[in-house]
């Protein structure tokens, strides 16, 4: 019991360190860009919410080590917190687009790193996979909020679709069934962040940005639609009861 408490204390220290790094990032960004109250408040809420949720998840998972892959994901979460603060601040002022793009680009580039680190170090875990997925989903949501101010509120469908799926699964539990691995699903998910980043950078003409984001939304709807259809068919298809060996012998005669 004492050993488990020691492991838990170390894990809680790492999650608290992540929140501290997040606050440090805000302390560096805030004065440099003249961040307003909305950015500060949103960034602090993100830091403490991440710490609280992650601390609880770590405690329930009973991991003995936080692991290098989770540290990479925690670093990505710190960058996402900075992006979130900048997007919130954009409703009051005009934070540097280059800074927002830089933080987002690094967070997206590191997306595949944590998984590779987990596999190479043998530290893959359900907690790590869920942590990585939630960071990705929240970054897409924040980016869709930012791009929606340029292209219209319909862009929020990109960021909100995954959360709508989770909410629907509470009403229809069959949506919680595990899905088979899919390279297409992973590709579509990765494309969302890249497309929103391109549109948010404002480097391309408005019609081009519109076409890019519409294509991203279309591919996302196709991916979710395909998965929902597969889950529904699986749910509706009755599983044949296993035949006892004795019955098989009788049928053979």
Image (cartoon, grey):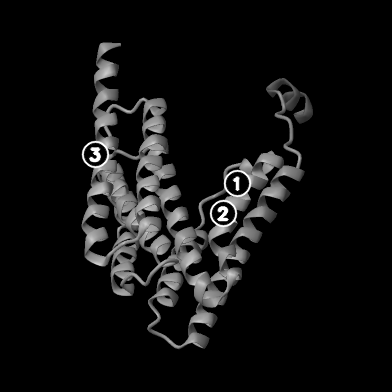
Q: Residues under labels 3 and 2: Cα distance?
A: 29 Å
In which quadrant is the C terminus drawn?
top right
What is the residue that sits farthest to the top in this orientation? 1
Which one is in front, 173 or 171? Answer: 171
Q: Residue at x 29, y 42 (%)?
A: 19
> Label for residue 162?
2
- Report whether 118 appears left or right of 53: left
Q: Which image quarter: residue 226? A: bottom right
- Mark 3 or mark 1: which comes first in sequence? 3
Check disc 2 and report its element: helix, strand or loop.
helix
Rendered position, 15 above or below 34: above
Badge 2 density bin: few <14, some 14–19, many ≥20, Cα 10 Å: some
Q: Is residue 172 visible?
A: no
Q: 137 and 17: which one is in front? A: 17
Quarter residue 153 falls in: bottom right
Q: Nearer the viewer, residue 18 or 57?
A: 18
Query: Are dots 3 and 1 in contact, CB under 8 Å?
Result: no
Classify mark 3: residues with Cα within 10 Å, few (<14), some (14-19) or many (20+).
Answer: some
Residue 4 horizontal/vertical position (percent): 29, 17
SS category of the residue bearing label 3 = helix
- Residue at 37% across / 26% down in the picture? 59
Q: Please provide percent x and percent y for residue 227.
A: 62, 55
Q: Which mark is residue 17?
A: 3
Residue 114 horizontal/vertical position (percent): 31, 50
Q: Nearer the viewer, mark 3 or mark 2?
A: 3
Q: Is residue 237 left or right of residue 126?
A: right
- Residue at mark 1: 166
């Amino acid at each position: 019991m004492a050993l488990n408490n020691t492991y838990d204390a170390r894990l809680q220290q790492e999650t608290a360190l992540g929140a501290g790094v997040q606050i440090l990032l805000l302390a560096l960004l805030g004065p440099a860009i003249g961040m307003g109250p909305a950015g500060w408040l949103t960034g602090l809420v993100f830091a403490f919410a991440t710490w609280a949720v992650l601390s609880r998840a770590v405690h329930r998972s009973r991991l003995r080590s936080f692991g290098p892959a989770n540290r990479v994901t925690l670093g990505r979460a710190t960058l996402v917190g900075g992006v979130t603060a900048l997007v919130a601040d954009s409703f009051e002022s005009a934070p540097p687009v280059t800074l927002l793009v830089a933080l987002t680009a690094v967070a997206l580039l590191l997306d595949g790193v944590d998984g590779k680190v987990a596999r190479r170090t043998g530290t893959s875990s359900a907690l790590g996979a869920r942590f990585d997925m939630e960071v990705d989903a929240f970054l897409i949501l924040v980016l869709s909020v930012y791009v929606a101010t340029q292209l219209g509120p319909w862009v929020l469908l990109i960021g909100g679709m995954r959360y709508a799926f989770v909410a629907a699964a509470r009403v229809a539990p069959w949506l919680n069934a595990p899905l088979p691995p899919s390279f297409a699903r992973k590709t579509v998910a990765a494309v969302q962040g890249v497309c929103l980043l391109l549109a948010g950078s404002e480097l391309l003409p408005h019609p081009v940005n519109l076409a890019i984001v519409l294509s991203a939304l279309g591919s996302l709807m196709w991916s979710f639609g395909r998965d929902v259809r597969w889950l529904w068919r699986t749910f509706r298809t009755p599983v044949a009861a296993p035949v006892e060996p004795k019955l098989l012998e009788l049928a053979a005669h």
